Image (cartoon, rainbow, N blue to C red):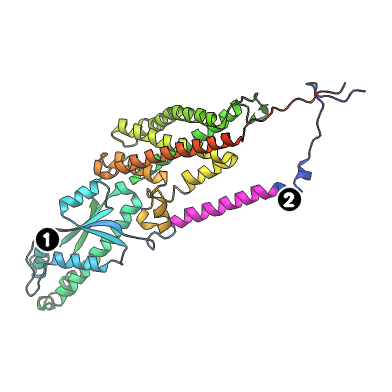
Amino acid sequence: MASPTTPSGRAPGPTARAGSLLRHPKLWIAPSVLAGLVALLLSLLYMGGIIDPNGNLHRLPVALVDADTGAPPPGQQKNLGAQVTASVLGGSPAGSVNWHQVTQDRAQELLASGKIYGALVIPADFTAAVTALAAGQAKARPTITVLTNPGVGSLGSSMAAQINQGAARAASLGIGKQLTASPAAAAADPAARLLLADPVAVTTQAGHPIGAHSGLGLSAFYYTLLLVLSAFITANLIHSGVDTALGYADGEIGPWHTRRPTVPIGRTQTLVLKMVMTAGILVLTTTLVMVACIAVLGMDASHLPLLWIFSYCACLAVGLGVQAINAAFGSLGQLVSMFVFIALALPSSGATIPLEAVPSFYRFLGTFEPMRQVSGGVRDALYFDARADAGPARAWTMIAVGAVVALVFGFAMAHYYDRKGFKRLTPQPQPVEAAP
């Protein structure tokens, strides 16, 4: 009597039950260990970078402008602008702020190139205005101006503004002590003495304004994130699609399953194929990211040809890196590349929280992690007129280095595997014939 067969003529194989498989501990070990490690590391990496920006503050670059040209008050050697400058420099916690004592024109240049997060400006008539106030002849309160730089990121600009406002307020109270101790203050009415105790007004304004459609300085970060994610996903789709097309992986969409005949090809040639396809398809994805962000959503952007070329080169460096890692690590490659290009890159990008406000480990990662380099180049193109002194040279250099490293590493590993005889050939399963 013939064995029972399926409609296709094949003999039915034994069917395993999920309940019985779940009782095997070995089935649980690998996914449990990997999932636990990923959850733990992601939590430590992401939260470790943002948990205490003020406590981790290290040499945040801020400009200090003393434009006061007034003569020193009677009995004093320095005018009030110089006194405020000394108070600001001496009042900051050691190592937290990197004060740049510059002229007002130089401060504007630094703001326009994204090299500082803000500026504190003491005006030319500061001493004269304070003296007039003390004599009861002032028409307005003396003013110190805080300049912000939203193009470097809303949080970084806000931190610099808070530092500057605190320094200006402390300087005002210090000057107030001098004024209220003078004989003229003793004869003043209570309202005047109250004004003399805190005589300086602090105003805040944008030192280098950006467009209204710039996400408060965050559009550069999210545009960078889109580039990296699209390159990462594109490369992995090509990796799995090529393996399926060449018969080294099964194709499964819903209930449909396919297994193509295996094409005999070495690892090196497979990597060539994947990298060439990555370079070609990223032309499309890069263009669509720009179209969606700029043409459809109206993101403020200029220097569009330069922005497209930079975006494509950045995506290409990421895509080649993903293919190289997949070639070296096999099925674990996607997990490894996720950590390299996303998990480690996001907290060290400096695009949301300044690198000067994160632990030193992330500042170290920021020297080579790709998202830091890409966000710097994108920010320069979007907010700082693609100025040569705004940092694009570093971005271009690091992207080129990343692409070369990816090519060398990927082909070195693939060639090594080929030379050692680690073939990828997997015999296609043969159908089980029905018993006669």
Disc 1 residue type? Asp
Disc 2 residue type? Pro
First-in-chain label (1 vs 2): 2
Front position in the image: 66 or 395: 395
> Which residue corresponds to mark 1?
68
Q: Residue furthest right?
A: 1
Image location of residue 424, percent across then percent down: 62, 32
Front position in the image: 116 or 418: 418
Residue at x 23% of width, y 63% of height: 168
Residue 344, labelled with which disc? none
The quadrant where residue 406 appears: top left
Dots 1, 2 in contact, CB < 8 A: no
Q: Is residue 96 magenta?
A: no
The number of callouts visible is 2
Image location of residue 372, percent across then percent down: 38, 46
Residue at x 39% of width, y 50% of height: 366
The quadrant where residue 215 appears: top left
- The residue tagged with tag 2: helix, strand or loop? helix
Magenta stretch: dominant SS?
helix
Drawn side of residue 427 relative to residue 73, left or right: right
The C terminus lies in which quarter of the figure? top right
For marks 1 and 2, give the CA distance.
Answer: 76 Å
Q: Does residue 75 sit above or below 113 in this rendering?
A: below
Q: The magenta stretch spans which residues?
A: 28-50
Residue at x 27% of width, y 64% of height: 166
Q: Between tags 1 and 2, which lies in front?
A: 2
> Which residue corresponds to mark 2?
25
Which class describes the residues within 10 Å of circle 1: few (<14), some (14-19), or many (20+)?
some
Which class describes the residues within 10 Å of circle 2: few (<14), some (14-19), or many (20+)?
few
Residue at x 57% of width, y 37% of height: 417
- The residue tagged with tag 1: helix, strand or loop? loop
